[in-house]
Amino acid sequence: MKEITELNLPENLKYSDSHEWAGVEGDVVTIGIDDYAQDQLGEVVFVEVPEVGANYSKGDQFGTVESVKAVSEIYTPVSGEIVAVNEALADSPELVNNSPYENGWIIKIKADNISELDTLKDKASYLEMLKG
């Protein structure tokens, strides 16, 4: 297990209390689980992703991540339509461990209301939550 000071938490992303990260490009939000979550889960062996075209509301479960230790639900921090899923995870779920932000992203969602992300934490606030 990593120490909190060892976590890779990019400054340009937002973080949820349930350990998802969100990166924004226009009205498309890329979502995955963050370095803390993958570290806590251990070796990821399966990632369940939704269908492209499916619609979700903020806070809905959209998939699961299964590791050798546990199965964890993944929640969307924004409402919208799934426009892409990371197909590479079907054959290489370990990408979530090895590269949670670059190659281990899980979905891209076209946001109905991008301001829903305002409730997420920046890196400093997220680190404070983890320490507390």
Image: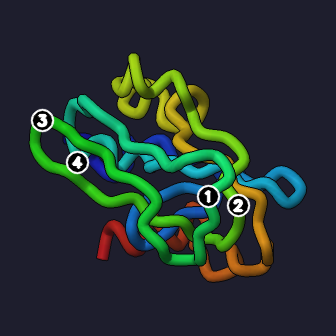
Measured in 3D between alpha carbons, the distance from the residue under mark 2 to the one under mark 3, in whole angstroms, is 30 Å
What is the crowding at mark 1: few (fewer than 14 residues within 10 Å), some, or many (at least 20)?
few
Q: Secondary structure at mark 2?
A: strand
- On the image, numbered disc 1 is attached to which residue? 54
Q: Which numbered circle lies on residue 80? A: none
Residue at numbered disc 2: 81
Query: Which coloring applies here?
Result: rainbow
Task: Give me the residue at 45% from left, 27% from top.
Answer: 89
**Kind of element beneath mark 4:** helix
Residue 116 in the image: state x and y as whole percent.
Answer: 70, 80
Quadrant where the C terminus is found in the figure = bottom left
Whether pointer 2 and pointer 4 mark residues with C-beta atoms closer than 8 Å, the reply is no
Residue type at mark 1 is Ala
- The residue located at (23%, 48%) in the rendering is 40
Mark 4–mark 1 Cα distance, whole angstroms, equals: 29 Å
Instruction: State the image coordinates of residue 12 (x, y, percent, origin top left).
Output: 71, 52
Cβ–Cβ under 8 Å for marks 1 and 3: no
Residue that numbered label 4 is attached to: 40
Left or right side of 121 for 20: left
Distance of mark 1 from mark 3, alpha carbons? 28 Å
Q: Nearer the viewer, mark 4 or mark 1?
A: 1
Residue position for label 3: 68
At 78% from the left and 79% from the top, the residue drawn is: 115
Mark closer to the chain start, 2 or 3: 3
- Residue 35 in picture, x, y percent from top left: 41, 44
Q: Earlier in the sequence, mark 3 or mark 4?
A: 4
Could you tell me the amino acid type at mark 3? Val
Badge 2 amino acid: Glu
- Label 3 sits on a secondary structure element that is loop
Quadrant (top left/top right/bottom left/bottom right) for the N terminus? top left
Residue furthest out toward the right: 26
